[in-house]
Amino acid sequence: MDGPRRRYILHMDMNAFYCSVHAAEEPERYAGKPTAVAGSVELRKGIVVTSSYEARARGVRTGMTVRQALAACPELILIRPNFDLYRKYSRAFLKIAESYTPLVEAVSIDECFLDVTGSGQFGTPVEIAEAIRQRVRAELSLPCSIGVGPNKLLAKMASDMRKPDAVTVLRRRDVPKLLWGKPCQALYGIGPKTAEKLKKLNIRTIGDLAMADEALLVSRFGVYGAWMKRAAHGYDDSPVNPVPEAAKSVGHATTLPADMTEREDLRRVLLNLADQTSRRLRRKGMLCRGVQIAIRDPAMKTITRSALLASPTDLREEIYKEACRLLDAYWQPGQPVRLLGVTLTHLSPKDETAVQLDLFSYEKRERIEKLQRVMDELRDKYGENAVLTAGMLGDDPSALIRNKTVRGTSLDKDFLRSPEREEHS
């Protein structure tokens, strides 16, 4: 059960968000027309991130290449991503949501949960949902679907039932009639791999899952198995958690035991710093758009210099390359250095950024990212020193920042937020 107190949860899902934002900004160009947001529009090599409902009606789907989308809909209007604009509208609709309850959990750039259990002064849950939908339409010119339910699970399922621009209620007593005939993967929280494993147990629908033996599910899936059975009956205890402010930067600095004057030595330090800052960035699921270096001389005079990258990244080599460029631009050869630091700024969640769509060398980057993932997995399993490049080896403190037991800098504040996530994220 969800506990003695009845809850009222809303799930707010912005419809075709990126395309809708462009239509709101420039209605004369995009409103009511088949549009798609995709990268590398000029070269026709990008992937469709999302498309308007007019484009979907003509066969355009997320994940298509631009070439495929144009074949399906020759009149399709292609739009380059503008994530600054999307974040602006995201903050705007979240602000509207927060005017009805402080319990707003942003799930992604275009969806959130609201707990309106204590918001009776604004009306019934359905009235609140309708008021929000109308305000978002009137103030932002955006469509949204809002689900109303007794918990997050059913609110999410409800918002998916009617799109675009609708309010839908899903009560627990409606679950057998409305959900049990659907495949397991239709249940929020069950992915394709789990659905395939369930099929092998002859559990194909949500109804099958609801009737399944819990001991069998637990033996095969652990506590997740027990959760799935409860979810199939419409139960979900998870609270709506307002998201704390995300870190604005990720940084490391290291004081050198002796003054360094050789460019090669300084570059090795920067490589180690870039390595660990990028590791932390990937653990957080973030990308950075800015790189900043700090250089301190023996007189304790510190200068910081920064630059914006052409595209957001979480790759060590790209961060290292920019840090070296900044060093070469602002460090005089032979000048002694006592401390070096690298800080990554202008952070954004990776799953909202679709950075690969903005790069011409899409396939090359995909290979690099795959290699980086493998290296991260090896280091997660066998330790930070499991996979190193020759350029990272040395006896200065920059090599020690990979050691969690001894490293620590004034720029690293991760432990204040979530120490239990240090090992895995």
Image (tube, rainbow, N blue to C red):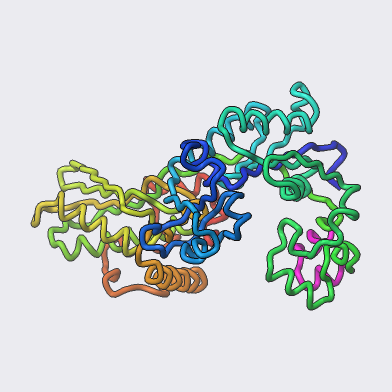
Q: Nearer the viewer, residue 210 or 302?
A: 210
Q: Note whether 280 is above or below 25 in the view shown.
A: below
Please give left or right for residue 379 compared with residue 310 in the image. right
Q: Residue at x 39, y 45 (%)?
A: 346
Q: Nearer the viewer, residue 259 or 100?
A: 100
Q: Residue at x 76, y 21 (%)?
A: 121
Please give left or right for residue 149 compared with residue 335 in the image. right
Question: Magenta residues?
Answer: 213-229
Q: Residue at x 32, y 58 (%)?
A: 319
Residue 401 visible to an observer of this rendering = no
- The majority secondary structure of the magenta stretch comes to helix
Residue 107: percent from left, percent from top: 61, 46
Please give left or right for residue 161 compared with residue 47 in the image. right
Residue 123 quadrant: top right
Residue 46: percent from left, percent from top: 44, 62
Report the quarter where the C terminus lies: bottom right
